[in-house]
Amino acid sequence: LVRVLLDLRSGGLALLSGSIGDAALAILAAALLLGLPRLIGPALALLCVLYVERLFATGESDLGILALSGVGILLVGELAQWSIDSRVSGRYERGLHVSRGLGLMWLSLLGVASLALGLLAATAPVAGGLGAAVVAMAAVVAASAVISVAARRAGHPGREA
Amino acid sequence: MIRRATPRLQAYIVLGAGGLLAGAAFGRPEPAILVAPLLLAALAGILFAEDPGLRIDVTAPSDRLLEGDDVRLDIRLQASRRVPWLEVALVLPPDLIAADGIRARGLQLEPGVPRAYSVLLRGRRWGNHRIQGVVARARDRLGFFAFEARIDPGLVLRVFPRPESIRRLIQPAETQASFGNQTSRRAGDGIEFSGVRPYSPGDRIRSVNWRLSSRRTELHVNELHPESSTDVVILLDTFTDLAAEDQSSLASAVRAVTGIANHYLRRRDRVGLIAFGASIRWLTPATGLLQAYRIVDTLLDATATVSVSWKGIDLIPPGSLPPKALVVALSPLVDERMIDALFNLRARGFDVAVIEVRPESYVAEPSDAFGATARRIWELQRAMLRDRFARVGVAVAPWSFAVPLEPALEEISVFRRQGRLVLA
């Protein structure tokens, strides 16, 4: 994924994208080697930054790379978490990993579907101007806040379910 | 159960929000489309997360075992919802281990269908060991949430010390009046021939030695040794517990105490126990199987706790030290209070024998010349201490956990036999 996203048009850009890619790989390696799931998020963030850097540096939107990056980032996060979850020493049934693998496949399909929907929505003509953009941004922030609050409530450590 | 979100969920939401914001800010759809799978996965995770309604039952068919033996622990699980990823782990005390080395299991549960599995636990060291808990962690289908529960099964496994095998015991200097298996030094009714003496009124006719009497002018009777019982008090030093790797002086001493006590009790002797240390626990001498159980029960709670207060034998209840009792002490002889107590007991006329649980076995070999000199001085001091005991008639036999107890007991017996010859 990092190799696909590298921007090699000039020495400076190659250095910049290479540094971001290396940092993402280093953090991911640390997360896997040390078994720290908290480091998965920063590694994924750097992969997203790598894509955005390429997008704005080249200015061209390649749908193939976008789809690959979207599903790839999701798969990197899921596989890394799966690897860390399996580190607990003990005797595990084979069915556990089969079930997790099926879940991951299902999630990947969901990711592809969401990408397709996103692309369809992006290509649809939307009327408006600066006002519509501001409203859209507010809606995005509100939606993010609702999701965050829901996640926070669900994951409150002291809450008895 | 406590529900916890994994850090991945938070990361997906933050990245999703960031991508949406970046898309809106730069007026390009690509950043928002890039993070759409992450946002959708997070949403799906939140929507599908449900408490599995897990129930855990832990039972043990038997709560008693010998050191080194295994006991089965049955774990029964049931959930009201499907659990695709369940981890169950036992929280065990250090001296209780899983026999196959596997403490955690990963399994799946179908709704309403109970599942059970067994774990073999091995007692590494004697004592009352409480199973500290069973921890279960159920993950949802996408692994975004973990439902955690910890239950206390309230199970205490009693691991009895494996007794040292003994064939011969220390013969006491004096016996009690009651009937037993130990040949008394006194003359009386018994089986063992003691000697002959002139007849005196009151002697039974069947005691007359006719062969000797026919050669003399007066009647002579045979004298016999009666079989009497012995009072044995085992004095266990709980001031000190020297440890190295998985062995400790107290653990070894307790195994020896169990072996010695069982052997004397099998001979119908009365056996008492005094665990002499920071706290003093005692059992007045008694005989029988019940006393064997009492001794083991008392030993299971024997621990060496740090104390700086001076404790002498005055604190020991008189009833637990009957007159003419043989006192068998097991001690590494490193605490002054124990050494002083042993000298005091001897000064009060008790028949004392000491099995020294060698402290050298638990001390690392010196690594330099200074350490070697210090070690040599220490060993000389210990030799002097043994000599002091020998001079007051107390046999001290060094014993290490790596060798059988039998030679140490034999050494004490030899010392006591030679001591009698010298005194005669």
Image (spheres, coloured by chain):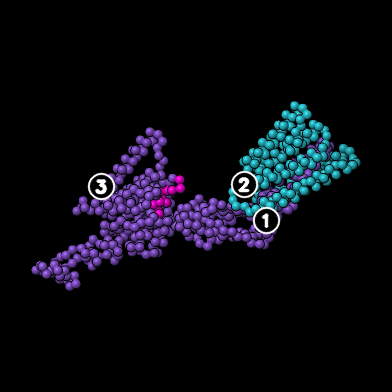
Chain colours: A cyan, B purple
Residue at the image point whose x is 83% and y is 46% from the top: A117
Left or right for B232, reference B199: right
Quick one: A103 or B78, which is closer to the camera?
A103
| Secondary structure type for disc 2 | loop
Q: Is residue A53 above or below residue A126?
A: above
> Along the polypeptide, which appears first: circle 3 or circle 1?
1
Quadrant containing the N terminus of chain B in the rendered view? bottom right
**Label 1 chain ID:** B
- Label 3 sits on what residue type? Arg
Q: Pinpoint residue B293: horizontal percent, then vertical percent.
A: 41, 61
| Secondary structure type for disc 3 | helix
Which stretch appears magenta? B245-255
Characterize the local packing of mark 2: few (<14), some (14-19) or many (20 or more) Cα atoms within 10 angstroms.
few
Q: Is residue B373 rendered magenta in the image? A: no
Q: Pinpoint residue A57: horizontal percent, then vertical percent.
A: 79, 31
What mark, if any, has residue B83 been given in the picture? 1
Left or right for A99, reference B152: right
What mark, if any, has residue A87 been given in the picture? 2
Residue at the image point whose x is 40% and y is 54% from the top: B255
Q: Pinpoint residue B172: horizontal percent, then vertical percent.
A: 28, 57
Foreground: disc 2 or disc 1? 2
**Label 3 chain ID:** B
- Label 1 sits on what residue type? Val
Quick one: B359 or B178, which is closer to the camera?
B359
**Label 2 chain ID:** A
Left or right for B342, reference B224: right
Q: Are marks 3 and 1 in contact (CB under 8 Å)?
A: no
Q: Pinpoint residue A4: horizontal percent, then vertical percent.
A: 75, 36
Residue A35 found in image quarter:
top right
What mark, if any, has residue B391 been given in the picture? 3
Q: Is residue B338 visible?
A: no
User: Disc 3 versus disc 2: distance between alpha carbons?
Assistant: 63 Å
